């Protein structure tokens, strides 16, 4: 069970026992209606290492929750706590391992089970049992362990996590987690986490290792599954793990490879051992006829790959300098001279005999035979027949911010490459693609530090100020005042003055009825300051705008979940909001929502319900709104096994959403539409051209709404097709 260490002998590894003790058992074996209540044999307390094991069968996928009632509570009172999970459909009994969100004060006397689909008798749900156990590692001081080591074999890529709670003195234990991904090559690998070195990890939730550790476990959160890998051990010091170089990624350097130019292939190799990986050699198998490696020296690179620093330790300069235990290689293939699709295999061997293989796909499109340019060509606007199509944009892409998408989802690689979002050339390419595919305005995420000023995240606005083609695109600020933003009257005045001084006078700033347009989260004002805050703060901004010579501000608020409910729409109207929109329609919180087994729902559900969703909101007749044309969702690169995603999004399915939007516009007279974000590269809301879908998402817009010119639509192409890019700051034309 132990691993040898460099600084201490094997005997001083920290041997921490596991706990698996049953606390309570509820044997149901019955079909359950919505809100079924179960009495427990003997009241019990939940602790920080409690696991809840639910065995259930459902005729269809659905969402479910467990709530508990404490001693002394009435029959219909809950402890204000519980845990939700997704049930898979089918005839098979399935077991889900859940962890409570927090520990209630008091003993549990009853448990209520809510299978939400059963509320409408649409789904038959049978509960076999609910078991409460103490499960995981026994409690121990964090100072007793420097790291954790285990062995694991994975045939598929998975988002996983280490989970624990930290207890300090009389304080309530605080939950933490550290996300990681499996090595999906079917071979056994040793995983080592340096638990002392956690301050700068990418994972949201920032792991912390101090105090007393309770309830430590390993989870596949998307499946509500826990697991205990082989050879798991806490260690003091640094373990000796032989060099283990693994081919992490292989993909064409050009997002859209074309005949007529060489094919550079980017290779990422990560060493999971604590000894350097030496003698690296490559081979590429299954190349098509006429395609070869241009420089054989690329197959035998010099130097070693450094030892692991404790798994995925990163800094802000990651995209420039890389992980200490990772190297990037390039092998350039010859120009195939023709369109061709092939699936080669990269084979890595190392001096210690380790072999790593990875298949990758290359699709070479025909050459466009375009002449080189020295700057993005000027856009050619389209006639949209009176319909205005806009987009949401997230301006957050500079160097290290690409890491989660680059590491986990290289198929999302933008046609611009891993670009620097401050560059005017980037903005001009984006304007060209938007305008030539029928898009005329953008709501752009804009950040403000409460009572301090604008955030350095506002890259888009820096780039648009210098863009040559800015006259072709209207824009409006989407004030990201969500989550824990702290509102105040002082802050509202500062924010509004910034808009007046920096945005509203710009001829390209979007206006409706002469009013500058601002997007925001109006409900968050109420959450931050209490009832009446939204109306008061919006009133302050309106007064300031009128004093500056404008007829007012046209406020558009995101309404989020429950957008089909009249109460929410009426509340926004009462606040003084002019219109509503959704950042991205995902079905969550609507009658069209489905369960999310394995953390996903199908894009077909989104596409199939969008028209009904818009009609329902329109029929309320309370507040004008911008229909949201969803471009997808998938925040797994950000959140790991704490996230979820919409799967199966394709340009053809998105084209159906566009056709339904056109139908809705013709039925209702609504002429302003909004595409879900085009550039949330780490959230799967993608419409800008990329390796997976090319220009398909944008082309679906113009093919649905635009009047095709006699000469045809403008040609969509990549910077590489005219000899431009990549777009890092070092390669910028404008310094």
Image (cartoon, rainbow, N blue to C red):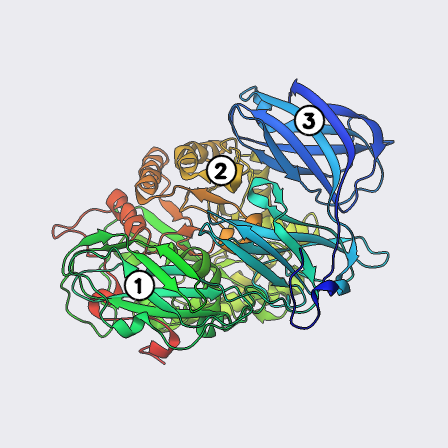
Could you tell me how far apart the alpha carbons at marks 1 and 2 are, in whole angstroms? 46 Å
For residue 94, above or below residue 274: above
Q: Mark 3 points at which residue?
A: 129
Using the image as rendered, state which of residue 567 and residue 717 is in the foreground: 717
Helix or strand or loop: what does disc 3 sit on?
strand
Q: Report crowding for label 1: few under 14, some 14 to 19, many 20 or more residues within 10 A (C-alpha).
A: some
Which tag, 1 or 2, sits closer to the chain's start?
1
Which residue lies at the image location 59% right of the left edge and 58% below the top edge? 204
Residue 583 placement (x, y as % from top left):
48, 49
Is 323 on the left-hand or right-hand side of 337? right
Is 670 on the left-hand or right-hand side of 168? left
Q: Name the residue under label 1.
A: 283
Please name which of the two marks, 2 or 3, marks the residue nearer to the observer: 3
- Please say if the residues under marks 2 and 3 sit with CB atoms less than 8 Å apart: no
Which residue lies at the image location 68% right of the left edge and 69% below the top edge? 237
Helix or strand or loop: what does disc 2 sit on?
loop
Which tag, 2 or 3, sits closer to the chain's start?
3
Q: Mark 2 points at which residue?
A: 587
Helix or strand or loop: what does disc 1 sit on?
strand
């Amino acid at each position: 069970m132990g691993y040898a260490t460099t600084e201490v002998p094997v005997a001083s590894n920290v041997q921490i026992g596991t706990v698996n003790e049953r606390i309570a058992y509820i044997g149901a074996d019955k079909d359950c209606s919505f809100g079924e209540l179960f009495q427990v044999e003997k009241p019990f307390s939940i602790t920080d290492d409690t696991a809840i094991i639910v065995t259930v069968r459902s005729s269809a996928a659905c969402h479910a929750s467990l709530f508990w009632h404490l001693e002394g509570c009435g029959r219909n009172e809950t402890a204000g706590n519980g845990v939700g999970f997704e049930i898979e459909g089918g005839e098979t009994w399935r077991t889900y391992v859940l962890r409570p969100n927090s520990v209630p004060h008091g003993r549990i006397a009853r448990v209520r089970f809510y299978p939400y689909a059963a509320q409408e008798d649409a789904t038959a749900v049978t509960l076999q049992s609910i078991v409460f156990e103490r499960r995981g590692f026994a409690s121990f001081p964090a100072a007793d362990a420097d790291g954790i080591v285990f062995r694991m074999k994975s045939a598929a890529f998975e988002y996983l996590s280490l989970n624990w709670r930290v207890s300090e003195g009389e304080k309530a234990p605080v939950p933490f987690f550290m996300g990681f991904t499996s090595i999906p090559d079917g071979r056994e690998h040793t995983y080592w986490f340096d638990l002392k070195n956690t301050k700068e990890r990418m994972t949201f939730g920032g792991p912390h290792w101090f105090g007393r550790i309770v309830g430590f476990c390993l989870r596949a959160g998307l499946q509500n599954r826990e697991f205990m890998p082989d050879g798991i051990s806490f260690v003091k010091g640094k373990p000796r793990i032989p060099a283990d170089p693994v081919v992490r990624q292989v993909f064409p350097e050009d997002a859209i490879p074309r005949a007529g130019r060489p094919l550079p292939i980017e290779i990422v190799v990560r060493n999971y051992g604590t000894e350097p990986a030496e003698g690296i050699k490559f081979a590429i198998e299954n190349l098509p006829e006429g395609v070869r490696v241009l420089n054989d020296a690329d197959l035998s690179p010099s130097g070693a790959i450094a030892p692991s620093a404790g798994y995925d330790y990163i800094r802000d300069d990651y995209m420039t300098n890389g992980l200490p235990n990772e190297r990037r290689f390039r092998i350039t293939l010859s120009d195939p001279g023709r369109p061709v699709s092939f699936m080669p295999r990269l084979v890595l061997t190392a001096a210690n005999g380790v072999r790593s293989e990875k298949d990758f796909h290359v699709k070479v499109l025909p050459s466009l035979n375009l002449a080189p340019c020295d700057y993005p060509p000027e856009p050619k606007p389209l006639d949209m027949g009176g319909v205005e199509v806009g987009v949401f944009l997230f301006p957050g892409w500079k160097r290290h911010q690409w890491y989660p998408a680059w590491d986990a989802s290289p198929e999302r690689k933008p046609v611009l490459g891993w670009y620097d979002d401050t560059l005017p050339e980037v903005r001009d390419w984006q304007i060209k693609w938007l305008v030539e595919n029928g898009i005329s305005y953008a709501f752009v995420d804009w950040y403000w530090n409460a009572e301090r000023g604008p955030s350095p995240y506002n890259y888009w606005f820096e780039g648009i100020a210098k863009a040559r083609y800015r006259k072709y695109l209207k824009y409006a600020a989407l004030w990201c005042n969500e989550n824990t933003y702290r509102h105040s009257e002082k802050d509202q005045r500062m924010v509004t003055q910034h808009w007046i001084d920096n945005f509203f006078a710009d001829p390209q700033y979007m206006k409706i009825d002469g009013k500058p347009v601002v997007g925001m989260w109006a409900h968050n004002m109420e959450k931050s300051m209490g009832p009446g805050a939204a109306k008061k703060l919006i009133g302050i901004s309106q007064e300031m705008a009128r004093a500056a010579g404008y007829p007012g501000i046209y406020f558009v608020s995101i309404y989020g979940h429950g957008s089909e409910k009249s109460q929410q729409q009426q509340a926004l109207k009462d606040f003084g909001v002019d219109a509503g929109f959704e950042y991205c329609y995902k079905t969550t919180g609507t009658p069209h929502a489905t369960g999310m087994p394995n953390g996903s729902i199908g894009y077909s559900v989104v596409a199939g319900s969008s028209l009904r969703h818009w009609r329902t909101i329109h029929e309320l007749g309370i507040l004008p709104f911008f229909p949201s044309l969803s471009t997808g969702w998938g925040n797994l690169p950000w959140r790991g096994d704490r996230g979820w995603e919409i799967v199966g999004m394709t340009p053809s399915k998105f084209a159906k959403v566009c056709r339904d939007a056109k139908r809705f516009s013709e039925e209702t007279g609504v002429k302003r539409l909004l595409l879900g974000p085009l550039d949330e590269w780490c959230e799967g809301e993608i419409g800008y051209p990329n390796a997976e879908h090319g220009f398909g998402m944008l082309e679906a817009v113009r093919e649905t709404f635009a009047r095709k010119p006699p000469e045809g639509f403008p040609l969509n192409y990549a910077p590489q097709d005219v000899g431009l890019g990549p777009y890092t700051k070092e390669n910028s034309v404008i310094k």
